[in-house]
Image: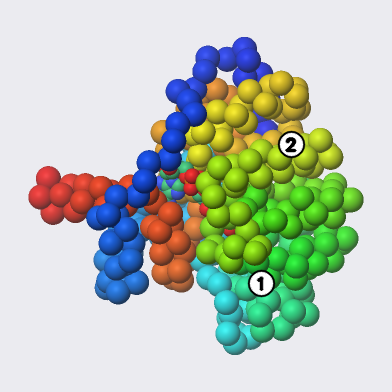
Amino acid sequence: VRGAPGLNTAARPGLPLSPRKTPPVPLWNRLLLWLLPLLPRAFVRWVAGPYIAGETRAEAVETVAALNRDGAVATVDVLGEDATVPAHIDSAVAEYRALVDAIVAEGLKATVSVKLTQLGLRLDRGECERALESIVGHAATACEGGVFVTIDMEDHTVTEATLAIYAAVRAKYANVGPVLQAYLFRTPGDIDRIVSTPVTVRLCKGIYVEPADVAWKDTEAIRESYRAALEKLLRLGANVGIATHDEQLLAWVLPFLARVRTARDRYEFQMLLGVTPGLRQMLLRRGEQVRVYVPYGRDWYAYSLRRLRENPAIAGHVTRQFFARFIG
Ligand SMILES: Cc1cc2nc3c(=O)[nH]c(=O)nc-3n(C[C@H](O)[C@H](O)[C@H](O)COP(=O)(O)OP(=O)(O)OC[C@H]3O[C@@H](n4cnc5c(N)ncnc54)[C@H](O)[C@@H]3O)c2cc1C
């Protein structure tokens, strides 16, 4: 991960990170989560506001510029998934290419993130690969060193195809990297595959609801798998974007990185826009590189539902926002 500042955690004041149990999700939260898809889209948009930069590229540029001023870097995602007609693929490619140009023109410290189903993975695999290559190729020559492109990982039915397309495009361009999901049983094997070529990979837990025969379900098992995957990736020479807001996991990661003396350009932390900004600030204050995932676009609905579903404090958050906006 280029430009990541280093870390000697042992020598720095500790984060207020202490292992603690994940509290059970209260009944009111569970009810609200269940109701979300039935609620008006305008309400979902309002509640999901903090997770999205806006609907336009200009709003994304503004958000990234503010993050850069704050000391964070970014990766920008054009919202959208599951292209159903070829025209969707063309407009996604055009928007990504324009986004890359905007990043370069504005001098932003940002990469881009892209979902392959948005580029037609379920429609036509060859077309999808050509579309990704068009974005990555454009990003490679947009500026010195190129703009890095991360391929988001979607549900397990497309993992194999996503990694195959990554490998094909990586064979031509160095400015592209995959995401691995710690909850998948297959991830240790996928690590062996991807490290055969120098790789910059994002490691996350995984967000999709997966069947029990392909993924860990238990919180602790997922954390354990995450720790093992991170250790393995670093040992085998990968650069890693450590994408998590889990304080309990970070309480292990920080001393681990110091213990194995991980070079400063081998890792960075990654967080989602609108999630745990306090934690982000703490990492920045410690001199860590933190990359914030900044989504924008008109297709905000599916992304917003996923973000809201994983927010354990959603009911309190909604109530607070409601009172702040309409009563406070
Ligand atoms: C930069 C980035 C990119 C990602 N890309 C992918 C991808 O390509 N594919 C994929 O499957 N998943 C992706 N994810 C999502 C990831 O897999 C997890 O679902 C998500 O990060 C929550 O897991 P966690 O490790 O933060 O731990 P959790 O235990 O889920 O969360 C830890 C704490 O973070 C806070 N938190 C987490 N989510 C929210 C939220 N939505 N709102 C408010 N607070 C919250 C809560 O305080 C929670 O207790 C990405 C995550 C990040 C940070």
Quadrant where the C terminus lies? top left
**Which of marks 2 and 1 precedes in the sequence?**
1
Q: Secondary structure at mark 1?
A: helix
Q: For residue 266, say whether it is visible.
A: yes
Q: What amino acid is labelled 2 in the image?
A: Glu
Farthest-out residue, bottom: 85
Report x, y in % for residue 126: 78, 80
102 lies left or right of 45:
right
Q: Which residue is mark 2?
A: 231
256 lies left or right of 318:
right
207 lies left or right of 325:
right
Looking at the image, is 223 positioned above or below residue 6?
Answer: below
Q: Nearer the viewer, residue 180 or 210?
A: 210
Query: In the rendering, which numbered label is found on residue 157?
Result: 1
Residue at point 28%, 62% (across, down): 31
Q: Quadrant of residue 186?
A: bottom right
Q: What is the image's colouring? A: rainbow
Q: What amino acid is labelled 1 in the image?
A: Thr
